[in-house]
Amino acid sequence: MQEIHASQVRPPFYRDERVLGIFSQLLVVIIVVGLGLFFYNNMITGLREKHNIAITFSFLTQTAGFDIGESLIEYSRERTYLRAFVVGLLNTFQVAVLGIIFATALGIFVGVMRLSTNFLVSKIAAVYIDIFRNIPLLVLLIFWAQGVFLKLPRVADAIVLGDAVYLSNRGVAIPWGIPTESWSTYLIILGAGIVVGAGLAYFLREQGKRTGRMPLVTLWFIVTVAAVGLIGWIVLPQPMTLDVPILEGFNTQGGKILSQQFMALLSGLIIYTAAFIAEVVRAGIQSVSKGQREAATALGLTAAQTLRLIIFPQALRVIIPPLTSQYLNLTKNSSLAIAIGYPDLFAVAGNTILNQTGREIEMFTMIMGTYLSLSLLTSLLMNIYNRRIRLVER
Amino acid sequence: MKSMRKLNKAGMILSMVIGMIIAACMSPAAGPEVVESDEAAAPAMQEVQSTLSIVQERGKLVCIGNSQLPGFGFLDSEGNFSGFDVDYCRAIAAAIFGDANALEVRPATARERFTILSSGEGDVIIRNTTWTMSRDTDLGMNFGPTTFYDGQGLMVRKESGVATLQDLQGASVCVVTGTTTELNLADQFAAAGVSYEAVVFEDFDQSFTAYDEGRCDAVTTDKSSLVSRQTTLTVPGDHVIINVTLSKEPLGPAVRHGDDQWFDIVNWVVFATMLAEEHGITSQNVDSFMDSNDPNIRKLLGLEGDFCAKIGLSNAGCFVDVIKQLGNYAEIYDRNLGPDTVFDLPRGLNSLYTDGGILYAPPVR
C-alpha cells in the first residue's frame, strides 16, 4: 500500500508533463482567440471612429432597384437586396451542379482514354490534359466568351436546328416545358412511383441476399418509376406543354435561353476541371495493383468488365478525396463569372449590391459564408459517399 | 492512457472557457481594457492630420481617375493620362504645388473608387462620378462643383431603326456594373413598361466589345462616354445615340467627409476655372491681367485679399498657376472634348450661365 502510494507522488506542477501539455494548449488558444478579437475590435472601432459606420444587415430588406439578366426564380427591380442575393446564389448553384456533373463525366472519359494502350487515343488525352490544365482559368473563360460564343452569328442570322433550337451569340434557345395546372398532381404521382420503386428495390435486394443471386435492382427501380411516370402522363390532361422558341423582335421568345455568358462559363469550367479530374482518375486507376487486372483477365472478364467490376471500385477509394477538392475548386472558380458578365453570386452580391449599398464588410461576410457553406455541403456529401465505398478492414 | 485523454479534453474545454472570458473582456463594451481600444483607435487619431498636409508631405496629389474613357480619363500607350477629368486633377496639383505634374493618377474601377478614397489611398476622386444623395450621405462623400452636366443615354445600331425606349421592347442591353447606370436603366424601362435583358459587365471594354459583336441591341452609359466610346467601335458610323435621356448625371470631384479645408480647395480650384472663362482670362493672356483694375479679377489672381491663404495655400497666386498651366474652363473643355477633337461634343448645358448654360461660379470676395 505504502509503496504504491509512493510511486504516485506527483512531480511539481511545472515539471508535470500533463499540466505543461494543458498549459501550452491553453496558451495557444488564448493567443489565437486574442489576436482574432484584437483585429475584430480594431475593425469595429476603426469603422465607428473613422467613418461612423456600424455593422448592420438591415439594408437587405430594402428595394434592390436593379435588374438581373437571368434568374431561376421570379425577380424584378422591386424585390429586395436579399432576393437579389438569392438569385445570384441560385445562378452559382446552377453552374456548380451542372459543371460538376459534366466535368466528372468528361474527366473520367479522358482519364480512361489517357490509360488506353492505343497510342493515338492516349496521346489525344495527354495533349488535352496538358493544354487545359496549364492555361489560367480566367484566360480560358475570356477566350471562350469572347473568342467562341461571342463570335457565333448574330441573333437575326441564328443557326436554327430543326426549327426549335436557335444558336446565336446571345446564347442557345431550346424548347422547354411549361407546367400546367395538373403539374403538381403529376409530381405527387411521380413521388409515389419513386416510393413504390424503392420498396421493390429493397424487397429484391433482401431476396438477393437470401438466395445469393442478386437481381438487377437498379434496372427494376428505373423501370418501375418510368412506368408509373408514363401512366401518370397519359392519365392526366397534359401536365406540361412544350414551349418552342421563335425569333421575334430583338430576341428569341419562349423556350429556355441558355445565355452566352452561362454557356461560356459552364464550358470553361467543365473543360478546365475535367483536365484535373482526368489526372485524378488516372492516378486512381494506376493505384490498383497490376495483379488485380491480370487476375480478372485470367478469370475471363472482358476489358470493360474488368474496368467496371474490378478496377473502378478499388480506384474510387483513391479517387474520391482529391475529386472532392476538384468539386470545391469548380464551385469557387465559378466566381470568375464576373469577368464575362454572368450574374453569379459574386457578380450580383460582391459587385452590384456592394456598390449600391457600400456595405463591404456585411456583403463580404455573407459571400464568404455562402461559399464556405457550399463547400462544406459538397465535402459533407462526398465524405458520406467516401465512407460508403472505403475499404472495410476487419 | 484513458485518464490522460480525459485530462486533455478537460484542458481543451478549460482553455475555451478562458478564451471566452478574455473575449468578453476585450469586447469594446467592456470598460477595463481601455488600452486595447486606444491602440485600435490610434489610426483614427492620425486621420485628424489634414488631407492638405498629407498631400504636401507626400509632395504630390493622388487623384483617383479613369483610364478607359477617352476624353475624360484615358491612359495612352505611352503611359500618360489625359482627359477632362485628369486636367482637373492637374489643376488641383497646380494650385497646391504650383506644378500640374506633381500628380499621380490612380486608375480605379467604378466599384472601387469610393473605397480607395475612404481608405485614404487617394485624395480626391475625379472620375466621371455622378453626384447622388446616397453617395453624398451613405458613402460619406462630399461632392464639389459639377464640372460636367451629363445624362445617361442609349446607343443602338442605325439599322435597327430604334428611336424611343418603347422600340427596345425585348431587347438586350449591355451595361457596366457598379454605377448609377444600372439603376437608371431599371427605373426608366420599368416606367416605360418595356421588358429587356440586362447584360452586366464589370468594365467598359467588355461591355462595348459585347455590344460591338452584337451580343446586345443597345449599350447604355453617360452620353459623354457613349460619344467617347463610339470612336473605338469597329465601324463608328453604324451606330447612333438615340434622343432619350434616362437620367441627370452631374459629374464632379468627390472628397471624404470631414475635411472642410480640403473640400474648399477642390471647390475653389474648379470655380476658378469657370471664373477665368467668365472674365476672359486664358492661359495665354493671364499675364496681361496682372495690372487689371477690376477688383473681381484682382482677387481671383491673388493681387488683392490673399484668398489662397483662406483655403490654406501659402502661394498667393494659386489660381494663376492653375490658369497658366491648365487654362480656363473653356480651354480645358475644348482641349479634351471640343471641336478639334474626335468627340466634337457641343457644350450644351456646360456653357457659362451668360451663354445659356448652367455653369455659375460664386464670386471670389
Image (tube, grey):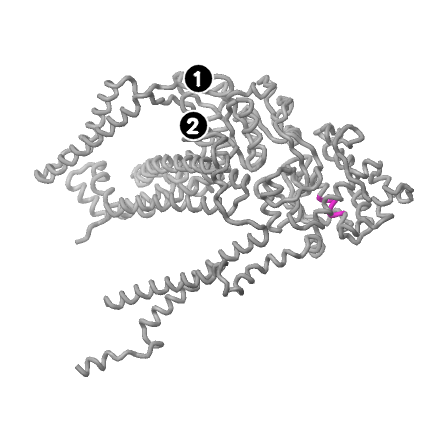
Secondary structure beneath dot 2 equals: strand
Cα–Cα gap, marks 2 and 1 = 14 Å
Q: Nearer the viewer, residue B329 or A321?
A: B329
Residue A326 to residue A105: above or below = below
Q: Which mark is residue A246?
A: 1
Across and down, in percent, residue A305 comes to: 20, 37
Q: Mark number for residue A258? A: 2
Kind of residue indicated by mark 2: Leu
Image point (27%, 46%), residue name = A386
Residue most toward the left? A211
Kind of residue at badge 1? Ile
What's the chain of the residue with tag 1? A
First in sequence: mark 2 vs mark 1: 1
Q: Which residues are magenta?
A: B89-94
Is residue B91 rendered magenta in the image? yes
B157 or A89, nearer to the observer = A89
Tag of residue B23 = none
Can residue B323 be spotted in the picture?
A: yes
Query: Label 2 is found on which chain of the structure?
Result: A
Q: Callout 1: helix, strand or loop?
A: strand
Q: Quadrant of the C terminus of chain B?
A: top right
Location of residue A132 in the rendering, given as x and y in whole percent from the top left corner: 42, 39
Seen in the picture, residue A367 relative to A162 is either above or below; the reply is below
- Identity of the residue drawn at 74% across and 41% down: B270
State yes or no: residue A200 in magenta: no
